[in-house]
């Protein structure tokens, strides 16, 4: 998810510039409000997803390791 947010933040100025060039002086207030609400929803959902999938602050994490030639996935230590 972090990569998606990084890519979105990278492309955001280009999208704003293209929208500005295409719309020019014919921008309606409703369109700008809709774009602002969509951006706010995107940011809110990204934060929600990041908080939902995170571990508790005091949870120990064991990284992935090799055991007998097999990769054992990492995860929270129980």
Image (spheres, grey):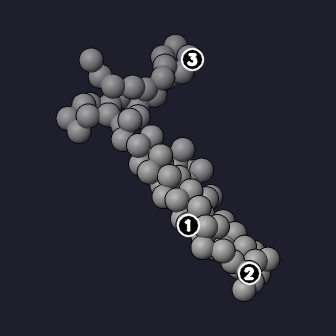
Residue 34's x, y, as percent?
59, 61
Residue 13 visible (yes or no): yes
Instruction: State the CA–CA distance, disc 2 to disc 3.
Output: 63 Å
Please tell me whether mark 1 or mark 3 is closer to you in this view. 1
From the top left corner, tell me how far across and down residue 2 is, in percent: 52, 49
Residue occupying image coordinates x 52% and y 13%: 68
> Can residue 9 be seen by looking at this rendering?
no
Residue 61 position in % (x across, y down): 32, 31
> Contact (CB < 8 A) between labels 2 and 3?
no
Q: In the current view of this chain or complex, which residue is farthest to the top? A: 68
Near mark 2 (Cα within 10 A), the count class, few <14, some 14-19 or many ≥20, is few
Counting other residues with Cα less than 10 Å from the Cα at mark 1, is it few (<14), some (14-19), or many (20 or more)?
few
33 sits left or right of 19 in the view: left
Q: What is the number of the mark on residue 33? A: 1
Q: Position of residue 64 (x, y in %)?
A: 46, 28
The residue mark sitting in front, 2 or 3, is 2
Q: Would residue 26 be found to the left or right of residue 7 on screen?
A: right
Q: Earlier in the sequence, mark 1 or mark 2?
A: 2
Distance between the alpha carbons at the discs numbered 1 and 2: 14 Å
- Given the current orientation, which residue lies at the most extreme left position? 58
What residue sits 64% from the left and 67% below the top?
31
Q: Which of marks 1 and 3 is nearer the N terminus?
A: 1
Of callouts 2 and 3, the N-terminal one: 2
**Which residue is identified by label 2?**
26
- Helix or strand or loop: what does disc 3 sit on? loop
Residue 46 is marked as none
| Tag count | 3
Q: Is residue 67 above or below residue 28?
A: above
The residue pinned by badge 3 equals 69
| Helix, strand or loop at mark 2 | helix
- The secondary structure type at the circle numbered 1 is helix
The residue sitting at 61% across, 67% down in the picture is 30
């Amino acid at each position: 998810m972090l990569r998606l947010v990084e890519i979105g933040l990278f492309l955001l100025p280009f999208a704003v510039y293209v929208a500005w060039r295409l719309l020019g002086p014919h921008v309606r207030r409703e369109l700008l409000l809709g774009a602002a609400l969509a951006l706010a929803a995107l940011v809110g959902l990204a934060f929600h997803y990041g908080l939902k999938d995170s571990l508790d602050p005091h949870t120990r994490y064991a990284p992935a390791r090799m055991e007998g030639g097999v990769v054992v996935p990492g995860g929270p230590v129980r």
